[in-house]
Image: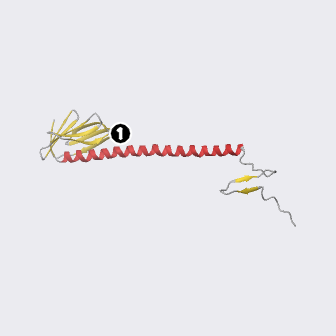
């Protein structure tokens, strides 16, 4: 009869873990070197994962900030442009903008201490048009009204409208 080879030298246990048997049959377990390599690999994977997550978070914040500025600009553009198109009189003084519409309402635009562009109606009522605005001013040139806004992120934009009305100095 043939002798069997020692098949107990390396056996796969449940879950894929290898148990090595010493010559005397005792279970050796993991060596110190294997434990250190495992810890190093885990630390390396954790570091790479954290770097990827942090980079993604920074990128998402930049996109979110840009989208907030774009939304504020589009809202401001829509409201100011509608008021200028329905204006009978536009007054620009010290960079500020006052508009009298065809229905007789007078609106003033100003930036408050919370960096919000506020549309104030004469006789009561105020509405926040856009937020995150550092400065807002208007100029008239050759029948056009140029509206400038500077945002908290440092960007600035310009709106040019050709109103069908008269200018007051």
As helix, strand or loop, the secondary structure at mark 1 comes to loop
Task: Give percent across and percent down for residue 91.
Answer: 17, 38
17 is higher (above) or lower (below) than 129: below
Q: Quadrant of the C terminus?
A: top left
Question: Relative to 64, is 16 on the left or the right?
Answer: right
Q: Quadrant of residue 97?
A: top left
Classify residue 49 as left or right of residue 165. Answer: right
Tell me the quadrant of the picture where the N terminus can be found. Answer: bottom right
**Residue 34 image point, x, y percent:** 70, 46
Residue at (21% x, 48% y) in the render? 82
Front-lying residue, 48 or 20 = 20
Q: How is the image coloured?
A: secondary structure
Q: Where is mark 1, residue-wise?
A: 155
Residue at x 68%, y 44% (from the top left corner): 35
Position of residue 88 relative to residue 15, above or below, is: above
Q: At x 42% / y 43%, what residue is drawn? A: 62
Quarter of the view holding residue 46: top right
Of 147 and 107, which appears nearest the observer? 107
Viewer-nearest residue: 28 or 52:
28
Residue 153 placed where, x, y %? 37, 38
Q: Position of residue 159 (x, y in %)?
A: 27, 43
């Amino acid at each position: 009869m043939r002798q069997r080879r020692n098949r107990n030298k390396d056996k796969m246990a449940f879950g894929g873990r290898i148990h090595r048997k010493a010559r005397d049959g005792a279970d050796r377990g993991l060596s110190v070197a294997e434990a250190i390599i495992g810890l190093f690999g885990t630390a390396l994977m954790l570091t790479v994962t954290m770097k990827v997550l942090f980079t993604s978070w920074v990128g998402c914040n930049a996109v979110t900030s840009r989208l907030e500025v774009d939304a504020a600009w589009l809202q401001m553009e829509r409201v100011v442009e509608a008021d200028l198109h329905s204006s009978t009189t536009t007054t620009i003084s010290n960079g500020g903008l006052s508009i009298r519409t065809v229905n007789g309402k007078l609106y003033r635009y100003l930036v408050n201490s919370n960096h919000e562009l506020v549309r104030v109606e004469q006789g009561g009522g105020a509405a926040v048009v856009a937020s995150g605005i550092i400065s807002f001013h208007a100029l008239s040139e050759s029948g056009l009204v140029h509206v400038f806004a500077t945002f908290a992120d440092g960007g600035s934009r310009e709106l040019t409208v050709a109103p069908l009305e008269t200018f007051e100095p």
